[in-house]
Image (cartoon, rainbow, N blue to C red):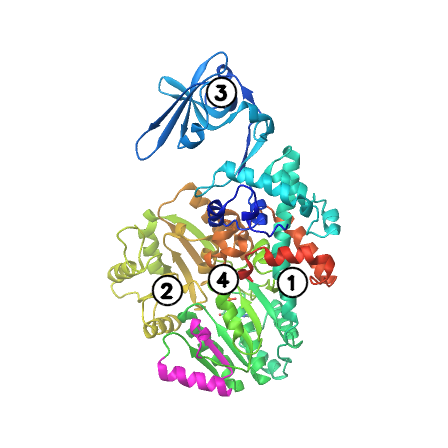
Amino acid sequence: MSIYDPILTIKGIGPKKAKYFNQMGIFSIKDLLYYFPRAYEDRSKIKNISSMAEGEKAYIRAVIKKIENKKVKHGLRMSKVLIYDGQESIYAVFFNKNHMVKTFSKGQEVLVYGKLSKKGVYTQIDGYEMYRASEAGGNQKIGAVVPVYPLSGKISNTDIYASVKRAFEMVSSELEKDHIPASILKEEGLCPLNTALENIHFPRDKKSLRQSMYRMVFEEFFIMQCRLRLNERNNLAKKSCVVKKEEKIYELIDSLPFKLTKAQVKAIDEIMGEMALGMPMNRLLQGDVGCGKTIIAAICMANCAFGGYQSLMMVPTEVVAQQHYNSISATLEKFGVKTALLTGNTKKDTREDIYSRMKSGDIDILVGTHALIQEGLECENVALVITDEQHRFGVSQRNMLSKKGNSPHALYMSATPIPRSLAITMYADMDMTVVDELPSGRKKVITSIITGEKRKQLYDSLMEKVKSGVQAYIVCPLVEESDSLSLNSAVETYEKLKRLWKGSVKVGLLHGRLSSEEKEDTIRDFKSAKIDVLVCTTVVEVGVDAPNASIIIIENAERFGLSQLHQLRGRVGRGSIQSYCVLVCESCSGESIKRLNVIKQSCNGFEIAQKDLEIRGPGEFAGHRQHGMLNFRIADISRHPDILEKAKKQVDKLIEEGIRLESDGNSLLKNIIVKNGNTDIC
Ligand code: ADP
Ligand code: MG
């Protein structure tokens, strides 16, 4: 008997029920035992009808006087059972439970669990369950706090309850062996597996329930971390190329138009230091928007080129690919580094040419979009793959990039900081480099919030500013006008401003539906100040770098997430001029004002990310593609950050001690890590 046996082995579950359980994601006994209640109901009270208050739920001990089954509309079946508790009679009304009700007959003594409710002048019991009084002694559901399970399909709460009961009887001896190492249980004061599981389903009292929940939250974090990080250790067994720091790199750094910040230098050292070791690097580079991650990437790629290796850099949009290509090639060209650009819009001939030059080693750095992970690209000599704005990519896309070359070193760059709790769950398998400093001379962007009614004044004063040489972005939530949503579209705003300003201000338009040439031309014109005001969609969110722009107006700001707003605001304040961000709020609820105030008050991406996590929850924050990683049953990184830290520390320790899952003592832990499903996330 094993907890990994299929649920079909549980008495009372036949093939049909098993199928319904499967549809709920329950396949093994373990799945069932880990299918936790969503709530608990106190059914310890047996009451007289007369002593029940309206809306109160309780058990009533009574005798059946009459049973009526009726069909009501839409296939709904209603059973009315008249019960008498020795003092008073009342109807207990059940819906779609006629099968259950049919097993009872007049004169039987029963226990009815239900809620006293008033329907017009009638008072009735909304019946939930009914048992024979003779069975009550053996039925744990009476006189106890009972679990309420999340339900779907044809499985009832009683089905789950009864199956869990039986499952416990079957595997109780197995559950005595805990998969969390004894030393950790002791250090963290965790209750043992069997106690925890039993109390989660059938809580003895509130305290046991609390302790059991705690243990399970810890376990979920712990197993998740083990899975990611012990997997990482397997990676270490692989070899990657040894890329040493080349002397020429200092020359390159000296040639830059600015001095690197201390944080940038430290990041470069960390990355290059690890690449010199010969084991594949797997590193997340985090830093606030505008801290200068691109140049860090460029320097590391140049170092590869100097050592005779190639690099790939993948970015989410064509606009950014083009821009990175321009700036990286301009910086590195004079050092003999050859850079090329590959996007979905690259013409076939050029693409073929790039493929063959990558193969022959003629190109040192290839910057591109998703086009990089296409099959055609072969590049044996790639030592470093970089994913910029990595949250825009799915796990599998990032992994595909790492499959290019021969176990290359991988660097992932985040757009804005990731809250620590998210970082240590979703990115537990990565090492972390944090750039915690902005280039000097940057002024804090002054942020204000206005309502739509003040828009006219806003645009009037914008025109005055622009006439004095300032450049601005106006970000809209939509490309074109939509019938269903009353949001400002980029095209509409662009047309409106062109009419309003009649050529005295040069307005440009940028959105994702333009052709690559149009996008490229527009951005170039904006950078060279041929365009004064760029009306755009969130295509500019990622990475667009026009350091002279100093005003950003964000329309329908209430529509955006906090991290996204911070990222958008990061388009300005990149030079030494004082910059401004205006958040225009169209349908402003108190809630949205509260959110926007976070942006107004803080310019610190780490702080904002944390708030964003608290407000929107981890799933929203992580983006749908990475959802799977945060699918905990009861653990919640925003509610249990302390337990998360504790679990992390214990996993750190296991790794330091050089734990081997293969050794006998750890076979239970290994089983739960490997067999716990969800293995596709790694
Ligand atoms: P992000 O980290 O958001 O990707 P970028 O790499 O786009 O930021 O850099 C933002 C701007 O700062 C760019 O214009 C870049 O040239 C400039 N920059 C980068 N490092 C420095 C530095 N050490 N001193 C001054 N400016 C810098
Ligand atoms: Mg960037």
Give the mark toward the camera: 1 or 4.
1
Disc 3 crowd, CA 10 A, few/some/many (<14, 14-19, 20+) = some
Residue at screen point 67% across, 76% down: 277
Magenta segment: 347-376
Residue hosting label 4: 391
* Front of the two marks 2 and 1: 1
- The residue type indicated by label 3 comes to Gln
Query: Depth check: 224 or 128 in front?
Result: 128
Single out the mark in the foreground, 3 or 1: 3
Q: Rounded to the nearest whole Å, what is the CA distance between mark 1 and mark 4?
A: 23 Å
Q: Nearer the viewer, mark 2 or mark 3?
A: 3
| Earlier-in-chain disc, 2 versus 4 | 4
Crowd band around label 2 with a 10 angstrom C-alpha radius: few (<14), some (14–19), many (20+): few
- Sequence-wise, the earlier of marks 4 and 3 is 3
Q: Where 506 sits versus 622, above or below?
A: below
What percent of the width, then of the height, locates residue 556?
37, 52
Mark identifier at residue 153: none
Callout 2 amino acid: Ser
